[in-house]
Amino acid sequence: MHTLALAVATDDSWIQFDWTYLFQNFWTATFDGLTFGAIYALVALGYTLVYGVLNLINFAHSEVFISGAYAVVFTLSALGFGPNAPNLPLVSIILDLVLACLAAMLVSGLVALLVERIAYKPLRDRGAPRLAYLISAIGASFAIQYLLFNWRGSNAEPAVIMFTPKPVFDVFGTIIDSQQLTIVIAAIVMMVAVDQFIRRTRLGRGIRAVAQDPDTATLMGVNKERIIMSTFLIGGLLAGAAALFYVMKVPAGVIYNGGFVLGIKAFTAAVLGGIGNIRGALLGGLLLGMIGNYGQYLLGDAQWTDVVCFVVLVLVLMVRPEGILGSSLAKVRA
Amino acid sequence: MALLELDDVSVHYGRIQAIHNMSIHVDEGEIVSLIGANGAGKTTTMRSIAGLLSLSGGSITFDGEDISKTKAHLRVVKGMSLTPEGRGIFPSLTVMENLDMGAYTRSDKAGMAEDLDRVFDLFPRLKERQKQSGGTMSGGEQQMLAIGRALMARPKLLLLDEPSMGLAPQFIRQIFSIVKQVNQQGTTVLLVEQNANQALKLAHRAYILETGRITREGPGRELASDDAVRAAYLGA
Amino acid sequence: MSMGQAPMGGAAEAQEMQDDQLEESTRKPGRFHKIQEKWNSLERWQQWVFLAVFGLIVFFLPVLNPPIITTEPGTDFPLACFDMARFALAALGLNVVVGQAGLLDLGYVGFFAVGSYVAALWTSTDSTMVHIPYLWTLPLAMIVTVVFGVLLGVPTLRLRGDYLAIVTLGFGEIIRLLASIIPPLRGNVGFQNVGAPPGEHNGQPIFDNSHGTPWYMFTVVIIVVVMVLLGNLERSRVGRAWVAIREDEDAAETMGVPTFKFKLWAFGTGAAIGGLSGAIFAGQVGFVNNQKFDVATSMLFLAAVVLGGAGNKFGAVLGGALVSYLPNRFLFIADWKYFIFGVALIVLMIFRPQGLLGVRNHLLAATRRLKQWVSTAPPVAATSPATASGEEQR
Amino acid sequence: GCANSSSGGGGTSAAAAGNNLTQLPAVTTIDVPKDAVLPAGDGKATCASTTTLAYIGAETGANAQLGINIYNGVQLAIDQHNKANPGCQVQFKKYDTEGDPTKATGPVTQAVNDASIIGVIGLPFSGESKATGKIFEQNDLAHITPSATNPTLTQNGWTTFFRGLANDNVQGPAAANLAEKLGAKKVFVVQDDSDYGIGLAGTITKALGDKLAGTDKVTTGQKDFSATAQKVINSKADVVFYSGYYAEGAPFDQQLVQKGFKGVFIGPDGVKDDEFIKQAGSASANAYFTCPCIPGELIPSFSKEYATVSGGKAPGTYSVEGYDAATILLTGIDKGNTTRAKLKEFVKTYDADGLSKQYKWSSTGELEALPVYGYKVENGKIVSVGVISQ
Amino acid sequence: MTNPHDDPDATPPAEGHLSPEVEVTVPDDLPDIAEVVAPDRTIRVDVGEPLVSLNDLTVTFGGLTALDHVTFDILRGEILGLIGPNGAGKTTCFNAMTGVYRPSAGTVTMEGKSLVGKKKHAITQAGIARTFQNIRLFGEMTALENVVVGLDARHRTSVPGAIFRTARHRREEREAIDRGMALLEFVGIADKATAPSRSLPYGYQRRLEIARALATEPKLLCLDEPAAGFNPAEKQELMALIRSIRDDGYTVLLIEHDMKLVMGVTDRIVVLEFGRKIADDVPAKIQQDPAVIAAYLGTDEEDEDDGAA
Ligand SMILES: Nc1ncnc2c1ncn2[C@@H]1O[C@H](COP(=O)(O)OP(=O)(O)OP(=O)(O)O)[C@@H](O)[C@H]1O
Ligand SMILES: Nc1ncnc2c1ncn2[C@@H]1O[C@H](COP(=O)(O)OP(=O)(O)OP(=O)(O)O)[C@@H](O)[C@H]1O
Ligand SMILES: [Mg+2]
Ligand SMILES: [Mg+2]
């Protein structure tokens, strides 16, 4: 191997397509992908909503999410959950999970609102240019991460295991367990609810109006500030829910910078689906989860997952420059 | 009784003063017109009244209440509605949704339906195009939409910033007659117009604005026949 | 360092006044403004003297090692200076893309990485490739990164705004991941003994990876050259096309600006400078592996550009230097330094949303002549406009 | 030992469930070399008051814990030395690299420019060691790394570099040996993208021969391992060797068990940490570890003293190695080697036991005697199963 | 109500005696003029020949036919008015000509060459410039810089040329500033040359848009409602400006709802309604055309003196 080009051309050992393996494991890849994809989707929604209204990539949203995950861990630990799946009746497990979910939503929602008030509101009052928001967002993201770091240290929180997944049914020889089912169904239900909320309610109409022309929206009697806060709040609440599912899936995934990578994935999902579009976020999240898994099975190596995701993103954007469902939030017809 | 009163109002853009100690009033039931050259500060005045710009001096009273510090969206609730210069259509909301936005603060279903009928009567084109998105309407169609939307708010005070801009002649006439009609139904109107002739004929009273200062005031017809005004604004 | 900019007379000054008036709408006339006025009131030769002294201080910064400014004992000051310089250079390149042309690039570190790898592949003892002298890798790195820039740009530059942002972010990640996956790039194992410019002093190589000063001065010279050349670009149809695209892409296209072509040029120019910066960095550290080419570094570059004032090349240099300097200077607050850095970003954006130096695009040369023109121009809106031929005006 | 792992993970040693692997019993004592050199020396040493040793490596950032383990060990050695030797008060300085190769040159240059520093403990990670080895070499400053295990580090011709533990070429075969002892038939190897993980995976793959059931690669920061876990299960392996750090190893093991994996999980020194147990939860019961490190907690005297500098914490991975490295440098100083050149020569020719092992370096800076210890998780604690290398 | 064929001013002043079909290039070496006169511009005197032809031009949006088989020519040297009720398709017609929309049928040709499918900037370089119905200046740039961007359409400096400041680059820059200032003076806002364009009052912004469009040295200048928001006095000035643009050798296509202005300045008027052409004639005839009156002008009772003159 004397030149890189030669290496790429001749040494095919580092990229091999194993289609049979992918097909053998197709359904596993799909269901596993959907589960994580549902989490991406919920987080993606926060990006999409804020983007739709303020035209701004809320880079701190990943920290909104991870704050919720901390809340889940603390709540569940306080309720006695630990490294072993508890031996509790189903009802009380569900109750505990709902409690944890509420706690996470509360914390994430609060953090989202705080970020809005501290990092964005003052900029808005000063009519700052768009790039300033981006940097302020990055600053907020840094600050929250290192606040968590200084508080909790560089290690992930100890695992809290909520329940042992039970097989529910069998599709094409692949077993779908109760955990996967819970996550995917709950995520979809929540997203649909939000979608309907935005499409049908007065607040939703206000959100869309502010998204397009904040000044004129004000002239219609829309309270712009309230709309913006609501948007952050909704995004935060969903991120909180996502945090619960995330901890379910990765009981030891709660670490100060754990939101960052997931946040980028979720943001990618939002763009893939068409940023600003709620259904796009759902679709993008689920797709991205599956695509990553397919890539991994096809190329036989987890390190390819992200490469595959981004390549697919570029390909999709080349065909549909505004993402799959590419129109703006505002275009969701009532 | 004065529905709207500006007392000694000043407005700045940064260090540039756009409005200098302006005092005007609009009485209940009146049509008042504001005339001035490009850049005189008409739009600035309207935006300040609507609350989009903050005052650097003076006060605004509406319906007997000092609203100088009131947020813009609350002024809408109190009963004023501005059709901004450049129309301010929500480009990807449909025509129908745009009209709905006009009634954002209202909750009386029956009244809203009635107003919608009225708007569709005035502008049949809007009825035809209910589902088209606002941004793809032609310039003139957007202007109709903007006025229609303002009517949906059923305001006490209607602020119109150059409603005839970009309209075909027969529509300009229509707009003016609509303004008259709306006024007769009880809405007070403050009208900014470049179409000074018609505006002055329509208005009960008018102000002339030059570089941020009121220079003349009087009944519309009187100003319209004033030679100096004619020379400056009517292109005689 | 600012040949092109020093005499801020004529139109530039007038423009500044105007700009300021607009900026003032968001804040009170601040300290910066007073400095600006003072500066403008100076004679031209005085400005030059100031600049010369300032330039000398900057150039000899690591040697001066000023007490309060120094990053020691935490980290070696000359090396910290070098780090500032390479950040500044990278920020300068990103400024073309983000600040001038308004293309949001969140994967700029990808170009930086490519430049580093070029230097490593062609000079490191761990590389099996043909070896060439280190200094040759600098232009080579620029060429290779431009190729990457074009490869990325051609399919994606048609995308608008934030779609481009995510694609570039993805590009940066792909470069980093490929560096891990492709065996010849040696992933985390990396390349040791990357080359350096030649030269010895007392038997010791001058460009040693523990000697920050020569590296720093070398980089500063490059920065100056790059700034002069970028200044030339800015005051040409290219710079104007970039700003026009930033302001209103459709209108620019309608005014005859081949927007795609110029966006590609912006990308290419930015990429080349990023690659150059990466190659210099690789030479100084002497070791390249796949770490530190992550999204967070891209964000730091972006923060540098915006902090200084997007669109302003002096701002980019200042921002780049600051973003690198602050964590080094405040090493002693240990784990709190990044938290404070994050808060500082927010606070700075709140109090100077347009960046430390604000935007100043001087898109035309010949400012003095302009001043004459403007002062002799007839009053506004001549009632009967003359024809466009010149006779009447002279 | 693992005083903090009160979480009570892993009720039983569950690895046996559902497979026919043998269990290795835990050991409760460990042989410390009888004549191990200790920092106190004979108490009669004299040296200049400026004599300084330095630790260079992570103090902050994500990799801080390893650094803290090490410099606490160093601090302990220096404290003990200074207490015993009133005539020789050695100073201790610390430089923070955050474990980042691109940041390391600054602090290293700063340290080598400080003439009072005559010996260095560090740098902990292979990447930063690579990036800075040349600077030590040029300044003739000896440094003993207590934890960098990449084999190529000793192939640079550096005369100032000394590795205080076995490199990955030794740990790999030892891990294969452990799998053998457990009676494994098929071993699946998963590596991360670190220098360490890749190198180690390479040697173990080689040592496993036809026992290798498959391989996969994961990335740092990865959280979802479902596909990799599925691959392991598809391969029907009874042992998984995870070559990387616990941050990914723990969630991987957890997801592996959740997917139904019944075999044994083996991790190297980068995984051997109480954090692994905390983060993998009950799944950690199936875990074994390999480590070229001696279990410090089984040396009661050390363990007790260590608590005085660590604020009550038990020794961590590489605390003993840091302590030993410092001891060697301190011994050199006590013997009057108070210049960089002399101290380097002293280390080069050093041959004596430390707490953990015999220290005698080859010309390239590798140790000659290299025990690798095995560990496992039992009742939510890491316990040693004794030396596993041959 | 002028007509290019009998108005002596219609032909460019200096070259008025040359016969049609002759191209006159203003030479570079006349020091005074060379700096200000468009260096690449050729003034053609074959006045009256078709410059741009629209043939069966059709544009549809979904089910809506915004332009329906529209055919007309724009003749060299004339000011052509394009009027019609709101939503008749005037702006669409502009957009189809300037490459914003792709026609679903029909052709647009300029001097025999088709413009359909060309990029927007290519169309500008081919010689069509336009202003926007909603002003779209480069807000952060000064007035002069805005104009110079337009001029750049004719510049040839390459990127390396700009980096290294070649002789051509310097010459082009010098010329650009001179010509840019001349254009600003021409539209009457030279003293605002160094003001950021977004701080200019609306009326000046409109003028600046015209100057910027002229800077691209178009053969055809399209103005979309340039008088919107102007008061009658300002409209008078604008009329004079449009005339002088034509007198300078440009062809002008004008969309405008102000009848006084349209009738006063155009040589010929095309009327659209519902996407179809319903009339095409000199202003005097258009005013009498019953179809136009019905569709657009309306019968005016009282407002003689404005709008619909
Ligand atoms: N955002 C702004 N920043 C700075 N100056 C402004 C701004 N908006 C308006 N101005 C200035 O304020 C003055 C008044 O402008 P305004 O838009 O109110 O005028 P107008 O009477 O509505 O004119 P037109 O008839 O052109 O609409 C003008 O000189 C204008 O340049
Ligand atoms: N992108 C689009 N999608 C759908 N309909 C459109 C689109 N663009 C224009 N139209 C419709 O096409 C018709 C013609 O529009 P156009 O803008 O050409 O009108 P115009 O003659 O310029 O009118 P005005 O004088 O009001 O500006 C209008 O009915 C408009 O609603
Ligand atoms: Mg106005
Ligand atoms: Mg139009």
Image (cartoon, helix red, strand yellow):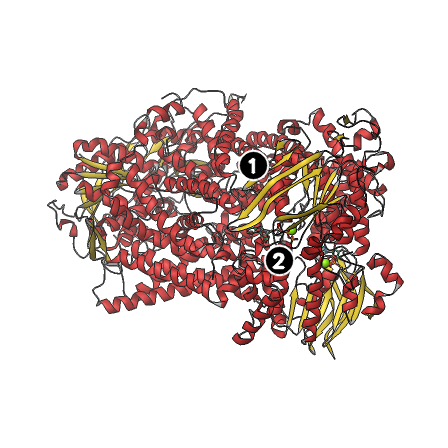
Q: Position of residue D98 (x, y in %)?
A: 43, 43
Q: Residue furthest front?
A: E290
**In the rendered structure, are the residues bearing label 2 and label 1 in contact, judged by CB atoms less than 8 Å apart?**
no
Figure quadrant of residue B74: bottom right
Identify whether A166 is placed above or below D358: below
Q: Quadrant of residue C190?
A: top left
Give the label on residue E200, or none: none
- Identify which residue, A288 or D148, lies in the foreground: A288
Is residue B180 found left or right of D103 in the rendered image?
A: right
> Which labelled disc corresponds to residue E117?
1
Element carrying mark 1:
loop
Considering depth in this image, is C217 or C266 the residue closer to the camera?
Answer: C266
In the displayed structure, does residue E249 sit left or right of residue E85?
A: right
The alpha-carbon separation of the residues under discs 2 and 1 comes to 28 Å
**Viewer-side residue, D61 vs D251:** D251
Label 1 CA crowd tier, 10 Å (few <14, some 14–19, many 20+)? some
Chain identifier of the residue bearing label 2 in the image: B
Q: Is residue D289 visible?
A: no
- Against D24, is A120 above or below? below
Quadrant hosting residue E252 = top right
Placement of the C terminus of chain C among the 4 image quadrants:
top right
Query: Which chain contains the residue that carries disc 1?
Result: E
Dot 2 corresponds to which residue? B141
Q: Would you say C61 lies left or right of A300 here?
A: right
Amino acid identity at mark 1: Gly
On whether ligand 2 comes within 8 Å of the CB at mark 2, the answer is yes
Q: Quadrant of the N terminus of chain C?
A: top right
Local secondary structure at mark 2: helix
